């Protein structure tokens, strides 16, 4: 599908069904910028993915609700449940491997 910025009106609907990646990031964060580029490549290679980006500087309440203490953090949702998370930056090959483990 695509990469979309967090929207409180659609968030619950997007994560409740299928496979969704949620990227919690911060402003002026080098590892977050690197991960953003990786996610851009990922969605190009796997266009069926839904990726939601959450700016923790702006969306502090959602970050607190999800116990985000540092960034970047990725949550992998499958049918509304967090099935895996990853703290820190990650390369394209590694994230594809994680997706493969979760989906298959």
Image: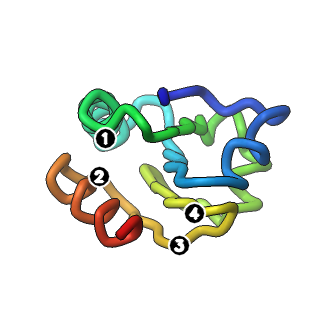
Q: Earlier in the sequence, mark 4 or mark 2?
A: 4
Residue at mark 2 to residue at mark 3: CA–CA distance: 18 Å
Left or right placement of residue 77 versus residue 89 in this view:
right
Residue pictured at 40% horizontal, 63% vertical: 87
Residue at mark 3 to residue at mark 1: CA–CA distance: 20 Å
Left or right placement of residue 58 versus residue 31 in this view:
right
Which dot, 4 or 2, sits closer to the camera? 4
Left or right placement of residue 99 versus residue 2 in this view:
left
Residue pictured at 31% horizontal, 38% vertical: 46
Which dot, 2 or 3, sits closer to the camera? 3
Residue pictured at 46% horizontal, 51% vertical: 71
Q: Earlier in the sequence, mark 2 or mark 1?
A: 1
Mark 1, residue position: 35
Residue 78: mark in rendering: 4
Residue 89: mark in rendering: 2
Coordinates of residue 62 in the picture (x, y in percent):
74, 50
Q: Earlier in the sequence, mark 4 or mark 3?
A: 4
**Which type of secondary structure does the marked residue at label 1 adopt?**
helix
Disc 4 to disc 3: CB gap under 8 Å: yes
Coordinates of residue 68 in the picture (x, y in percent):
60, 60
Disc 2 to disc 1: CB gap under 8 Å: yes
Disc 4 to disc 2: CB gap under 8 Å: no
Residue pictured at 81% horizontal, 35% vertical: 8
Coordinates of residue 95 in the picture (x, y in percent):
27, 55
Q: Which of the 4 image quadrants contains residue 42? A: top left
Left or right placement of residue 69 versus residue 12 in this view:
left
Q: Earlier in the sequence, mark 1 or mark 4?
A: 1
Disc 3 packing (10 Å; few <14; some 14–19; many ≥20): few
Q: Earlier in the sequence, mark 2 or mark 3?
A: 3
Q: Earlier in the sequence, mark 3 or mark 1?
A: 1
Q: Residue furthest left?
A: 93
């Amino acid at each position: 599908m695509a990469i979309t910025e967090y929207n409180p009106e659609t968030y619950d609907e997007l994560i409740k069904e299928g496979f969704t990646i949620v990227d919690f990031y911060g402003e002026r964060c080098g590892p977050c910028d690197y991960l953003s580029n990786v996610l851009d490549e990922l969605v190009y290679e796997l266009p069926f993915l839904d990726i939601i980006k959450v700016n923790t500087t702006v969306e502090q309440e959602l970050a607190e609700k999800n116990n985000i203490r540092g960034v970047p953090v990725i949550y992998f949702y499958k049918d509304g449940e967090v099935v895996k998370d990853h703290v820190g930056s990650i390369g394209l090959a590694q994230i594809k491997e994680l997706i493969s483990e979760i989906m298959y």
